[in-house]
Amino acid sequence: MNIIAIETSTEYLSLAVARDGHITSRSLLAGQRHAELLLDELDALLAQAKVVMSGVDAIAFGAGPGSFTGLRIACGSAQGLALACGVPLIAVGSLESLAQSAQADKVVACLDARMGEVYHGAYARRRDGGWDEVCPPGLFAPESVPALRGDGWTGCGSGFAVHGVSLQQRYGGALAGVKPGLFPDAASMLQLAMPRFLDGGAMDAALAAPLYVRDKVALKTNER
């Protein structure tokens, strides 16, 4: 089983290849150069993993939420490659990938959404290694994120880097720790995508679409 993963929901370009369960990955700070860098970086990664496109069984992509442009790049690139190779796609939420990267059992995943807001989701690990969605992905002001039950939660992502004070005030003693430097990465995405593929969770490439959550990308003059 060979699967490619593409994650561009943040300023990072993150790619990974699973070859018979072994994951090879690379991530770099791309800024706004995701589209420019993606194919060359993917070619290099495939060569490193000794995988050719004709041997790929499926392609996973970061479905969002996150940067509008980044989500379109990941989805569009995955669709183009999947259609060319005749393989299905696996959509993986960016916040769930972020939770996977935290290496904790109860995770609050927050990405900075600009405009004074965060993309937020909360996840609890199941015994089978997957995640229960405690709070689905949503867009909130940091001081208004959904309340959590119990303690022992790990907060992670750029939302905590930018709005850490407000989020920690909101959650009080519920947080056991914070990892603000984590971002959704393709290797973590593959850990989620591989069992979904085996369980029949792939989709036709034509049906893939990003999860935007927000319906506007800039504040009006009076809102600023």
Image (tube, rainbow, N blue to C red):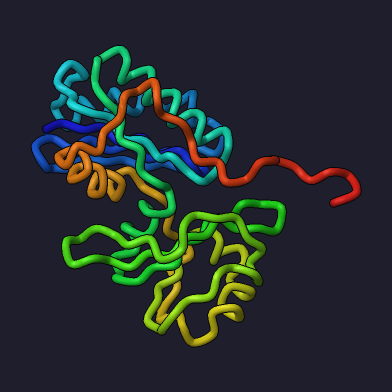
The answer to whether residue 39 of the structure is visible from this angle is no
Q: Is residue 34 visible?
A: yes
**Image point (30%, 35%), residue name:** 90
Which residue occupies the foreground of this view, 7 or 194? 194
Residue appearing at x 15%, y 25% in the figure: 51
Q: Quick one: which residue is furthest to the right in this view?
A: 222
- Residue 146, x across and y down, in percent: 55, 70
Residue at 63%, 67% in the rendered image: 142
User: Looking at the rendering, which quadrant does residue 164 occupy?
Assistant: bottom right
The percent position of residue 186, horizontal first and vertical second, equals 32, 43
Q: Quick check: 173 left or right of 143?
A: left
Residue lying farthest to the bottom in this orientation? 173
Figure quadrant of residue 8? top left
Q: Quadrant of the N terminus?
A: top left
Q: Residue 18 appears at what percent x and percent y?
A: 18, 37
Q: Does residue 47 lie above or below 211 as drawn?
A: above
- Front in this rendered view, residue 22 or 99: 99
Q: Position of residue 32 (x, y in %)?
A: 57, 34
Which residue: 22% across, 43% down? 196
**Rendered position, 130 above or below 170:** above
Task: Depth check: give the residue in front, 206 or 224.
Answer: 206
